[in-house]
Image (tube, helix red, strand yellow):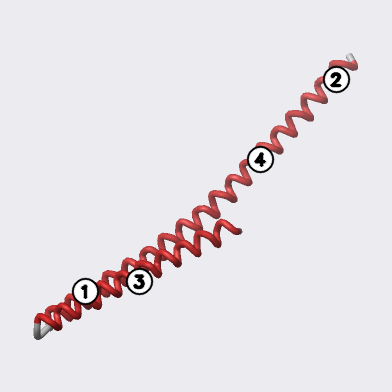
Amino acid sequence: MQDTKRMADEANRMGQQYQERVQSGFEAASRFFTEANKGFQALAAEMMNYSKAALDDAIWTWEQLIGARSLEQAIQIQSDYAKRVYENHMAELSKLGRSSLADDLR
């Protein structure tokens, strides 16, 4: 009888430990997904801002091209636009890289 009670108590203790570990695992997974979601939201917001700025720049450039008075002026406008697009794109990639690295270090 003693052995049966001891075995039942041991099984009960093991069941409680299992439940605590499962609960701890669920809490850790929940925290992970919450943080990952925040990261994705920040990335999406950053990409939206970059896309909006790029579109605004493209529209402004088209307005400038429409008003160009000479072929040389149109080529200069287009050349300046290409330079801005490249510089802005590289700056954005650098910013995203630093942001990703900072997230990894946390």
The quarter in which the N terminus is drawn is: top right
Estimate the spatial distance between the alpha carbons at disc 4 and disc 3, rounded to whole Å. Answer: 46 Å
Side (left or right) of 35 relative to 78: right
Q: CA distance from mark 3 to mark 2?
A: 73 Å
Q: Choose the circle earlier in sequence order: 4 or 3.
A: 4
- Mark 1 vs mark 2: give the one in front: 1
Q: Amino acid at mark 4?
A: Gln
| Closer-to-camera residue (91/16) | 91
- Cβ atoms at labels 4 and 1 below 8 Å apart: no
| Residue 13 in the figure: left or right of residue 44 | right
**Residue, far front:** 72
Quarter of the image where the C terminus is located: bottom right
**What kind of residue is marked 2?**
Lys
| Number of numbered discs on residues | 4
Residue at numbered disc 3: 88
For disc 1, the neighbor class at 10 Å (few under 14, some 14 to 19, many from 20) is: few
